Image (tube, rainbow, N blue to C red):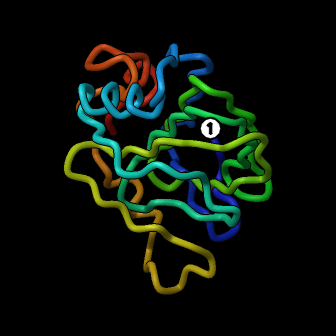
Amino acid sequence: MLAPDSAIPNHPRWPLLVYPAAVKLSGPDPAAIFEDLFARNRWPAAWRNGVFPFHHYHSDGHEALGVYSGEVTVQFGGDAGVTITAKPGGVIVLPAGTGHRKRSSRGSLGIVGAYPDGCRPTTCVPPLERYGNSANTVVAVPLPACDPVHGAGGPLFDYWKPG
């Protein structure tokens, strides 16, 4: 769980989830393994890239990050949050409102980003006056239909509960 931090709301009920070594990667296009997995679990891949090096969050959508190459250290939750290093095969699932920024990376960094079916999230970047009351938007985002890695019965639902 990440407490609100300055202009970053974080999610008031649902924690950041970290699945280290969640996926076995192989072949010439390891990103495609994440894209296929996420799509099967109703989190279609939206992009291949890295993580922005500045604080930002998505007020109206959850996000899954699957690392397919390199290593990345990300600060979650704002300046008072936590810093996590993820390696290839790792997945990090962010509930709506979770601040994040890249602190560093090693090697040729590659990440697949995905959002639940139908989600086209807004990227909110401090200062945040133009985003209105983001905290209310964050809590209104519904549970996804599936865990992006483990599907309908995945551990996400052990930690993310309605209302």
The residue at 74%/34% (across/down) is 85
Number of numbered discs: 1
Q: Give the percent coordinates (x, y) of residue 86.
A: 68, 32
Say if residue 61 shows up in the picture.
Answer: yes
Q: Give the percent coordinates (x, y) of residue 78.
A: 71, 57
Q: Give the percent coordinates (x, y) of residue 77.
A: 67, 51
Residue 17 occupies which quadrant of the picture? Answer: top right
Q: Nearer the viewer, residue 34 or 82?
A: 34
* 158 w.r.t. 133: above or below: above
Q: Check the picture and name the quadrant holding the N terminus.
A: top right
The residue at 57%/34% (across/down) is 67
* 54 w.r.t. 149: above or below: below
The residue at 79%/50% (across/down) is 104
For residue 38, side relative to residue 68 (left or right): left
In the rendered image, the residue lying farthest to the left is 118
Kind of element beneath mark 1: loop
* 113 w.r.t. 4: above or below: above
Which residue type does callout 1 highlight?
A: Met
The residue at 54%/42% (across/down) is 111
Crowd class of label 1 (few under 14; some 14 to 19; many from 20; radius 10 Å): some
* 142 w.r.t. 153: above or below: below
Q: Nearer the viewer, residue 106 or 135?
A: 106
Mark 1 — residue?
Answer: 1
Q: Give the percent coordinates (x, y) of residue 11.
A: 51, 49
For residue 146, side relative to residue 159 (left or right): left
